[in-house]
Image (cartoon, rainbow, N blue to C red):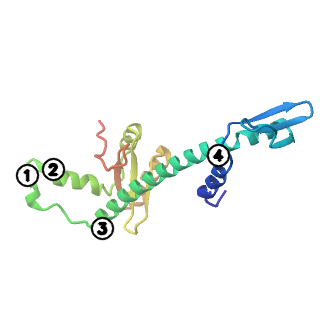
Amino acid sequence: MTERVDLETILARAEATPEGPWAADHGELGSDVYRLRDSGPLIADLSPELAEFIAAARTDVLEMAAELRALRHQLRQTTERERMWVGMAVAMADQSAPTAPDEQSADGPSEVGRLQGIIEGRHAPPTTEEIVAHIEACGSWLIGSRGGYNVLESDLERLQEFADRCRRMNLSWRWVAINVSGAPCEWPTVKP
């Protein structure tokens, strides 16, 4: 199915039908569908399967509509969150300003510099060990180019293949570690 389901039209049709409870009655001459409050069959002489389907249709449609609404809401939230992080990563990639000297102490970068480094990511691809450690922690990688192409990836084989290709071909893509909540995070620390 390529067209979006018109949920409101389907719900309007379902809600316009009389409420049940509905039942299917199977007799020797065929099956009938009843609304239990009525005295006679509304639809008569059906196959048992069709009678059961019709009797359950109103309830089934309303339940499926509720589930579809919940899934659409969840998808919108996920898509918005991913767009936000992709947009932030692209914006940070375009701003390649080095850390100012006053943001760094003798012990290394300040907290601001550390957080900026997390959001900016790195141009060198992660090692196989870093990829494996991050995926095992349910993380993913946001990979972006200066041309604006970005991909959020969590497939171990594809990540290893692309990281190897970046090293072989000396490609400069920005790699940002993304945690299970969808936010940029520190790269995994692995022991050699």
Q: Amino acid at mark 3?
A: Asp
Structural crowding at the residue carrying mark 1, measured as other residues with C-alpha within 10 Å and reported as few (<14), some (14–19) or many (≥20): few
- Is residue 114 left or right of 4 when viewed as pictured? left
| Front-most of residues 81 and 190 | 81
Structural crowding at the residue carrying mark 3, measured as other residues with C-alpha within 10 Å and reported as few (<14), some (14–19) or many (≥20): some
Q: Amino acid at mark 4?
A: Val
Query: x, y percentage for residue 41?
Result: 82, 40
Please tell me whether mark 4 or mark 3 is closer to you in this view: 4
Q: Which residue is mark 4?
A: 61
Q: Which residue is mark 1?
A: 105
Q: Amino acid at mark 2?
A: Glu
- Is residue 67 left or right of 33 when viewed as pictured? left
- The residues bearing labels 2 and 1 have C-alpha atoms spaced at a distance of 10 Å
Q: Which mark is residue 111?
A: 2
Which residue is at the far front? 39
- The residues bearing labels 3 and 1 have C-alpha atoms spaced at a distance of 26 Å
Which image quadrant for residue 138? top left
Task: Relative to 77, say whether 171 is above or below.
Answer: below
Q: Which residue is mark 3?
A: 94
